[in-house]
Amino acid sequence: MSQHQPLRVLLYSDDRDVRSAVVAALGARPHPDLPPLEYVECATEPVVWQQLDAGGIALAILDGEARPAGGMGIARQMKDELYQAPPSLVLTGRPQDAWLATWSRADAVVPQPLDPFRLAESVIALLRGAAVSGARP
């Protein structure tokens, strides 16, 4: 994995505060073994699909509480419709919603309010897993 080329992370939420909280929690480089992250922030579902169709996304972080299109539905649709979909992490509204996120076939689930350590741990594991499997953008 190149230490110089940033990993593009799609970040979908209709709420600017949620997007800001994720970026603040992860920072530019959540682990020294990984390249820096480049965030592709999306506030609407059509922009999410434009970015996914363009390719080069290493990870999709999707807000399960976003409106009108929730991140769980987008995560499921990604798995159904995209060949070699990037790994996905769904942010749920509360810890008790983790069971519901299994329907979405998300690769990881993190509840809100965000715990920066839990979020970083999940993101690092997903990005390392993508690199190992060859799913590098």
Image: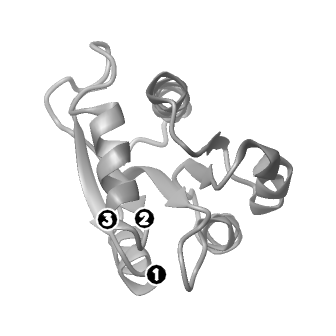
For residue 56, say whether it is visible. no
- Circle 3 packing at 10 Å, graded few (<14), some (14-19), many (20+), is few
Distance Cα–Cα, label 2 vs label 1: 8 Å
For residue 10, say whether it is visible. yes
Q: Quadrant of residue 103?
A: bottom right
Instruction: Return the residue at label 2.
Output: 12
What residue lies at 51% left-to-right and 39% top-to-bottom? 114
- Circle 1 packing at 10 Å, graded few (<14), some (14-19), many (20+), is some
Foreground disc of the pair 3, 2: 3
The amino acid at mark 2 is Tyr
Residue 84: percent from left, percent from top? 57, 56
What residue lies at 81% left-to-right and 46% top-to-bottom? 96
Residue 87: percent from left, percent from top? 56, 47
Q: Quadrant of residue 67?
A: bottom right
Distance Cα–Cα, label 3 vs label 2: 10 Å
Tell me if 27 is positioned left or right of 128 in this view. left
Residue 6: percent from left, percent from top? 20, 39
Distance Cα–Cα, label 1 vs label 3: 14 Å
Foreground disc of the pair 1, 3: 3
Is mark 2 in CB contact (under 8 Å) with mark 1? yes
Instruction: Return the residue at label 3.
Output: 16
Q: Secondary structure at mark 2?
A: strand
For the residue pair 3 and 91, the one nearer the viewer reads as 91
